Image (cartoon, rainbow, N blue to C red):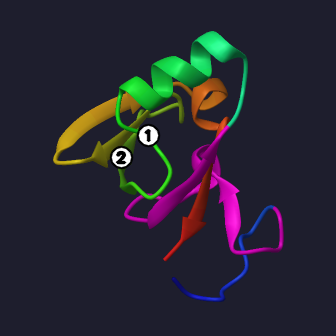
Amino acid sequence: MSDRPCEKTGSGVCPLCSMKIGGCGTVVGVDGEPGLRRRLMEMGLCRGTRVQIVRRSPFGDPIELCVRGYHLSLRNDQAKCVAVAEE
């Protein structure tokens, strides 16, 4: 993990929805209402998991991620609940 600050927060940790295409990072936490939090964690977005942004739709929502060897699409309002340490 680099010490490069995140564009939006100024730290090395930022929401998943703010990462650029091709960006990689490690999940450091999942927040949000209990149902959404549980669903995201069941899909593999647990602390310590490596994620990569594959692409975004033409209007920017949803985004496609590569998580644990499979592709996952999330809306931005879901992705903002996942905190990621950028690499």
The three-letter amino acid code for the residue at tag 2 is Arg
x%, y% of residue 84?
Answer: 58, 57
Mark 2 or mark 1, which has the lower sequence index?
1
- The residue closer to the viewer here, 5 or 47, is 47
Q: Residue at x 67, y 15 (%)?
A: 34
* Of residues 72 and 41, the one drawn nearer to the viewer in this rendering: 41
Can residue 74 be seen in this snapshot?
no
The residue pinned by badge 2 equals 55
Tag 2: Cα neighbours inside 10 Å, few (<14), some, or many (≥20)? some
Q: Is residue 37 above or below residue 68?
A: above
Q: Quadrant of residue 33?
A: top right
The verdict on residue 10 being magenta is: yes
Q: Is residue 35 above or below residue 78?
A: above
- Apparent side of residue 9 relative to residue 78 in the rendered image (left or right): right
Q: Determine which quarter of the picture holds residue 42.
A: top left
Residue 76 or residue 68, whichever sits in front: 68
Secondary structure of the residue carrying numbered label 2: strand
Residue 45 - label = 1
At which x and y percent is residue 41? Answer: 46, 30
Residue 25 highlighted magenta (yes or no): yes
Q: Which residues are magenta?
A: 9-30
Amino acid residing under circle 1: Leu
As measured in the structure, the alpha-carbon distance from the residue carrying label 2 to the one carrying label 1 is 17 Å
The reply, left or right, for residue 6 in relation to residue 42 is: right
Q: Would residue 39 be found to the left or right of residue 19 on screen?
A: left
Say which element carries label 1. loop
- Which residue is at a point 58% across and 35% down the rendered structure image? 79
